Every structure is written in C-alpha cells, then in structure tokens.
Image (cartoon, helix red, strand yellow):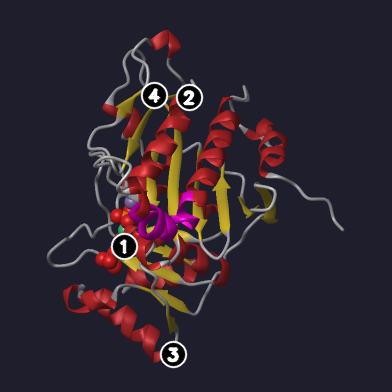
Amino acid sequence: MSRIITLSEFILDRQHEFPHATGELSRILGAIELASKVVSREVNKAGLAEDILGAMGSENVQGEQQQKLDVVANELFMNAMKGQGEVAGVASEEDEHYVVFETDRAKQGNYIVTMDPLDGSSNIDVNVSIGTIFSIYRRVSTGALKPEDFLQPGTAQVAAGYVVYGSSTMLVYTTGHGVNGFTLDPSIGTFCLSHPDMRTPEQGKIFSVNEGNYNDFSEGVRTYIDACKERRYSARYIGSLVADFHRNLLKGGIYIYPGTTKAPQGKLRLLYEGNPLAFIAEQAGGMATDGSQRILEIQPEQLHQRCPLFIGSKAMVEEAAKA
Ligand code: AHG
Ligand code: MN
Ligand code: MN
C-alpha cells in the first residue's frame, strides 16, 4: 500500500513555496481545514438536525430557532479565521461589510480572506452537493484595514480553494503551484491526498448553464449553447457552483453564468466565487473569463461585485467567449 499523505503534512511540505515562508499561510490553511471538517459534519446531519432533533428540541430550547446552515458555516469559518492571529479580516458573502478582527495594527495579521461559506444554499434542504469557496491575499495597506485590502485583483491571490460536500467531502486548493485535491476519510477525520497535481482536459463534452434563462442570454451565448447541443454534449447543472465546477474540472467541460438582459453582470460574485475558482482553473490548465476579460485581471470596485463567468476547459471557454 502506498503511503497516505495527509493535508496537514502536505501543507507543511509545500511551505517553502510561499514567498513569505513564515508558517502564517500554513496556519491559515490549517484553520480552514479544521472549519471545513466541522461544516462537513454539520452538512451530513442537516436533515437530522432540522427534521428530527430540531423538532424534538424545540420544546426545551426556548424560542431558539434552528440556524440556517449558511449562517452556521459563516460563523464556523469566521471563528476559525479569528482565532488565528494571521488573518486581519474577512469579507464574506454573508456579511455586508468586511469583518476586522483586531483594531491594533501591531496585533493584526498580514492576510485577509474572502469567502463564500456555503455555496449552493438552495441545495441544502434537498440533499444535493454544496460547497465552500475561499481566497487568501496579503494585505496591502498599513495602519487600519482598508477596503483596498479586499479589492485586489485575483492575480494577487496567495492561495484559493474550495470544499465540496458531496458523496464524499473534498478540499481542493492552490497556492499558485498547481492544484491538489484531498478527500476526507470520515473514519479518521483526516483529509488525505487523493488528487495530486490536478489537470483539467483542454476540451470537454459537458456544458453547465441554467438554460431556464436562455431567452435572456446574448446572441453569442445562445449560439454557443446551440453548438454544444448540435455536438450532443452533455448538459449537467447542479446549481451549486462548486459542485458543477469540480465535476467539470475532473471530466472536462464549461460552466457558464453569463450576464442577462435583467442582470448584465450575472449573479456570481467576483471576490469569493469568480476569482478563487478562476485561480484554480488556470492552475489546472483551464481558463476563466467574463466574456471579454480574464477574470483574474478585473479590478474589483465593490466587495459583493458580480461578474459574468465562463470557466473550465480552455478550448471551450475560448470558443464561448468568441461567440
Ligand atoms: P450561493 O448559494 O452562495 O448564493 O450561490 C448560489 C450560486 C451558485 O452556487 C450556483 O451555481 C448559482 O447560484 C445557481 O444560480 P441559478 O439558480 O440562478 O441557476
Ligand atoms: Mn455561492
Ligand atoms: Mn453562499
């Protein structure tokens, strides 16, 4: 049997790859690993907690509402980041403003994190794969944490990753030196390297798009979707970006969430959906664009800014963007 490499070991082994190899980034990744294991546990008992335990407990716990899983995930990841000391602040999909952990600069960390703590919320109650997405940046300001620390282009990401809570729980991340995937072995509570040096096929046969919006798409996007059908490509759309992206990364395919007539910037958020996944896609040999520009080069202006997203196998993304 070949030797098992755990995520913790792997992070330490690769620490030298970081430009500032002080162990700070390793500790942040370690905290994310821990929080994702707790979220994985919560996800796996979501049905129980709401329908069985929640109903029974409702008489004892006075008026206490069962918290929604995206709020629970947000708190778990926030607390993990806060406990670190390395993270100065976090911008989360769940919070309108970024959260600052420590006001004294001397005690502030050198990194900031952006995250979508629970991606695919509409799939929570129906037992379908969901995920977590995160990006890590070095802060650029001195003194108090400023918006510009969070509004950095995706090219400045130090690390990015996602966790998919699917038929198994997987954590996939990059620090700009390739992409590696780890599967949680629940019997020992450890992420083990299962997908070393992930590469996505140059060309795939899967297209993932919410075709219910077809009539609101641009001529070019409609033409591309028609071409996919003409070639008998497979339509696969889970409605959890992480899960759709992960499948396409492994098998080859394209995920599209374009702008529509009603929402020209689409639905997905640049800072904690577009950028981290674009970083991973590129590191795996794929591509990500908003239709005219590389996602990673967009200069963000707002924390919750949206962007159209064409992401996945390079040849497919190139063709879709040209259409
Ligand atoms: P979130 O649950 O974090 O709000 O993200 C949902 C996103 C993404 O995961 C998914 O691909 C997309 O919304 C689905 O949107 P439609 O239902 O419009 O297809
Ligand atoms: Mn999301
Ligand atoms: Mn979310």
Residue range in magenta is 42-55
Amino acid type, label 2: Gly
Q: CA distance from mark 3 to mark 1?
A: 29 Å
Secondary structure beneath label 4? loop
Give the labeled residue for mark 3. 232
Q: Disc 1 vs disc 4: which is toward the camera?
A: 1
Label 3 close to label 1 by CB (< 8 Å): no
Q: Which residue occupies 32% across, 49% down? A: 68
Please check the rendered image and state whether residue 272 is part of the magenta-colored stretch, yes or no. Answer: no
Ranked by sequence position, the earlier of labels 2 and 1 is: 2
Q: Which residue occupies 58% across, 29% down? A: 27
Give the labeled residue for mark 4. 140
Q: Disc 3 vs disc 1: which is toward the camera?
A: 1
Please check the rendered image and state whether residue 49 is part of the magenta-colored stretch, yes or no. Answer: yes
* Magenta span main SS: helix
Q: CA distance from mark 4 to mark 2?
A: 21 Å
